[in-house]
Amino acid sequence: MITLCLTNILSIFLKKFEINRAPSRDVVFLLDGSDGTRAGFPAMRDFVQRVVETLAVDENKDRVALVQYSRDPAAQFYLNTFNTKDDIVNTVRGLRHKGGRPLNTGAALQYVRDNIFTASSGSRSLQGIPQMLILLSGGRSNDNVDVSASALKESGVLIFGIGTQNSSREVERIVTDPSYSQMTKETQIFQSGFPKSNVDLFSLLFHIRLVDKSIDVVFLLDGSDGTRSGFPAMRDFVQRVVEKLTVEENRDRVSVVQYSREPEANFYLNTYTTKENVVDAVTGLRHKGGRPLNTGAALQYVRDNVFTASSGSRRLDGVPQLLILLSGGRSFDNVDTPAAALKELGVKVFAVGTRSSDIRELQKISYDPSFALSVSEFTDLPNFHQQLISSRAPSRDVVFLLDGSDGTRAGFPAMRDFVQRVVETLAVDENKDRVALVQYSRDPAAQFYLNTFNTKDDIVNTVRGLRHKGGRPLNTGAALQYVRDNIFTASSGSRSLQGIPQMLILLSGGRSNDNVDVSASALKESGVLIFGIGTQNSSREVERIVTDPSYSQSVSEFTDIARVQEQYLSSLKTQLLKAIPITPTVDKSIARKDVVFLLDGSDGTRSGFPAMRDFVQRVVEKLTVEENRDRVSVVQYSREPEANFYLNTYTTKENVVDAVTGLRHKGGRPLNTGAALQYVRDNVFTASSGSRRLDGVPQLLILLSGGRSFDNVETPAAALKELGVKVFAIGTRSSDSREMQRISQDPSHAMSVSDFTDLPSIQQQLLSSHIHMTTNTRFVQTDLCNLCLFSVDLETARKDVVFLLDGSDGTRSGFPAMRDFVQRVVEKLTVEENRDRVSVVQYSREPEANFYLNTYTTKENIVDAVTGLRHKGGRPLNTGAALQYVRDNVFTASSGSRHLDGVPQLLILLSGGRSFDNVDTPAATLKELGVKVFAVGTRSSDIRELQKISYDPSFALSVSEFTDLTNVHQQLISVLGTVIVPTMKPTVKPTIIGKKKYGSVLLHFTFYSRDPAAQFYLNTFNTKDDIVNTVRGLRHKGGRPLNTGAALQYVRDNIFTASSGSRSLQGVPQMLILLSGGRSNDNVDVSASALKESGVLIFGIGTRNSSREVERIVTDPSYSQSVSEFTDIPRVQEQYLSSLKTQLLKAIPITPTGKNT
């Protein structure tokens, strides 16, 4: 029976929803493996296998995980365990029934939430990938399922379930919607199957979603000489879109216009009234021809001659007006004015171009930049014609909030009738419109939720049967808060996380007894559009509550609502149309950010303020400040916060830089960081101040704080995180590092410098690791993995990775988690003799190597060795001695280290406490050896100690307990990617500078005699022409004596630094080319050694007076060249360039070849 039922379910599942066409998803199967399902387990296994067969399994497409449970859950494999369908199917086929009792479904649901739907286990929820759970349960749970099921729904997981006659009711409670459940009986076929999530809408290029039954569509086709070969495809595209419309006089109307030098209407909106006639006309279209391409004139033409009543436009009747432009090239005339005129007219313009088009021009023409699409050639149009119009009805979540107090008793029938008539205009369906209704007086009461009913009839019948609630006083504020906290939530059916518009329609008959402003603002901030109807007693208050005053309507009494009903419904439909999301195709290269700097302006930072100001200026220099790109705000605070300027104050980089340059220190005490955080949340990260949070633009807050706050920071910090703001906190030695970590979005986002004068040392780190973010079509949430700009292809790099594990008595309980962490990192490596090598060392009082870098050459052997690790035990904890041990005994050639071959050396330290011995000296010796040290500690560790040990303070991470290591696993993998410097032959085409080849090059020139002088820095110029022109204009410095040692020290301390443009921390090779014509007056050995120790490759050319000294300075004697005088350089130039190219080629890092799908 269970086999037959599951087969039937699967058949509908596949036939109705075409899973193989769906976009990326993370799908987790949760199978009841208790004693009660032993007989049915083969059928369950077969069901999973057949579902998997329909998926597009790939790392960047569909991912699958599977968990079995009875008393306890057990993961069979994670979302990131397998990347191919074959691997998953083979594993599923080999599944063995778990067995056991009792059945704890609640614990299993909690387990998948905490351990499977996480970034470290492969979940991509933070990238907006739909998260789905399919539960197969054969019995009633022994524990409570409601709390854990609600938690999953709140986190955005869509839950589907199949139960038996023993578990079906419980499964209905667990699933996202009752329709997502099925009982395995012949009489109940799973009608909903596995529905496409509304998140799937974001896989489409865009949608036309309409409230009205009618639409006027105008196609404007580029008919110039340049589109002759592509015209048949354009014609076919129009025809196939028309096939999706309902062409009738009172439904959809279509017009086609061609243009080149002049526009010409092929037919108008009122020319044809049947689909057959329109299709025939389109089929008979002939290419117009001509040049040049005047798109501006064509746009003006359709505005003045097609979108008019005489040509059949019904714009004045409220019918939506759409223009679809297909353009194959850049316009010869100006498009700005006519495009603006169309937008003012209310026409929604979509522009489709080819690679010959100007994407910026198309974006300016479009109603919104995201409505500009691109194909390589018009012959590619069939690939998305089906996506142009995907449905006639929009998707919305509509909530009615009705005043049910004593004062509305007489008007309640009219209110009820109004709701019914609005519902009649909606397309009620699980995947289209959803409706909820709440009545309130003193307290609110939900009559039904957004996921209670799936049909219009059910809603209308329920509305007809509504009874007036009654009661007093009227607490509208509390009711607004109630719908925000209890109705507009995933568990109640809200699809806000999938980008579905959220709307509230309020009918209020009196003034509220409580405050309405706070809760109304909270709803608006969360993206809810509020409409309202009030009476003479409440109209002013309703105007304050609604999103825009035009969204409110006033009547004398609700018995008069029928008088304004048609007018208000028409207005409501218009506003709903504006709210319909049209999914953009985002140009990933155009990231947008709202960046707010919150600066400690208290008395304690007076001396450091110039450095803070300079830091802000230099970060701003790296941004692309424009109205539609990056926006910047600066706020200072001490006792009180004060905005220097808001996100919408300036729209150019020059204006922002000028404003920052002119900043004056605020002064004052005490330091109230909590109040400042609350201030930026309530006053800066708002639409009125220029924040584009509701448009999905990433929101970043960079806090510079020089001391401990006098007030509480936890509540406002949490409020910012809930709002989706990514907070980065930078403190000094006077700050409280734990406070900085609590404020930050993630503890790893908290950075530290000794003084603000050291800010340049972390500037590049902040820019590369955090500020460079890409946006998405929905509200963006990312973890550190996605914030990493310079990740590399870990499959092509070579690394020697050593794990140093705290095996002292204090980590006994956490050791299994440490072991699991090591295993999962190893799973990400490519372990082979000539690729990645791994070693593990444990320590307490004494260190002990479990295995060396050359012990194992396969991943399987290493994983087995790690799995078999036993906790060492012992005390005290001597981290310093352990660091020295790995330097002297593990990072050596005899133990398998390839340090001398230029292979990156990485040490990952997991330490659960403060060291009893000194760590400074051994940590310094590791850094001198070039080892990149990452330190992960717990709350028992000393974060300052970990930062001192780490290669860079930002490489020190923190978790509460080692059981939380999964939270930083993916983050660590990302950070590892930032330091890899492969030594393999590059696969990138080099950029040629003169006759020298480089991969990606920043150049710097320094002249010196007695004192060095920088002519320009690594970040001064971005083009070859600028550098060449500057070099041509160089003048001889002159002066004596010659201090080469001081010059070498100068470039180490001032040029090879992040603030001067050096990218050493991102693993970019650092090279120095020295031309010296005489013996130095000072010592060169110390500074030359310091440069080499820091990883700089030194090349040199000397004369007969300096050649021996140059040989001592360069990295290798073969890197030096001698001439009699510099006038002889051309004689050896080709030979030296050839040698130089060979050495540079070895050092060039491999450019990532990650797959883009």
Image: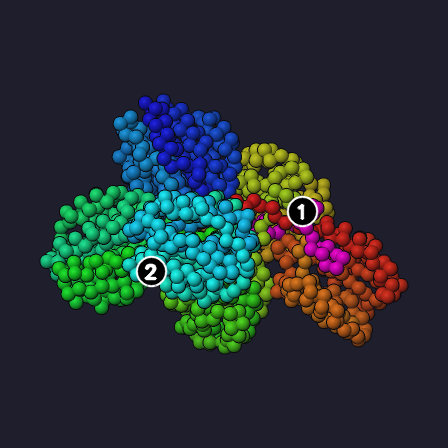
Q: Position of residue 1006 (x, y in %)?
A: 73, 68
What sort of colour scheme is used for the picture? rainbow
Q: Is residue 955 left or right of residue 593?
A: right
Disc marking residue 310: 2
- State the residue in front, 1152 or 38: 1152
Residue at image x 48%, y 75%?
Answer: 603
Disc marking residue 987: 1
Farthest left residue in view: 410
SS for dot 1: loop
Q: Position of residue 54 (x, y in %)?
A: 44, 33
Query: Is 981 situated above or below 1054?
Result: above
Q: What amino acid type should be assigned to the residue bearing mark 2?
A: Ser
Query: Is 1031 situated above or below 290?
Result: below
Residue at image x 72%, y 59%?
Answer: 993
- State the residue in front, 630 or 324: 324
Q: Bin the neighbour count of mark 2 within 10 Å (Cα to Cα): few under 14, some 14-19, many 20 and up.
A: few
**Residue 46 visible in the current orientation:** yes
Can you tell which of label 1 and label 2 is closer to the viewer?
2
**Mark 1 or mark 2: whose residue is earlier in sequence:** 2
* Residue 102 occupies quadrant: top left
* Residue 276 occupies quadrant: top left
Question: What residue span does the magenta drawing correspond to?
Answer: 974-998
**Residue 34 visible in the current orientation:** no
Q: What amino acid type should be assigned to the residue bearing mark 1?
A: Thr
Q: Is residue 347 left or right of residue 884?
A: left
SS for dot 2: helix
Q: Is residue 982 magenta?
A: yes
Q: Is residue 908 left or right of residue 315?
A: right
Is the magenta region chiefly helix, strand or loop?
loop
Q: How far apart are labels 1 and 2 at the CA level?
A: 62 Å
Q: Is residue 839 magenta?
A: no
Residue at image x 84%, y 66%?
Answer: 1077
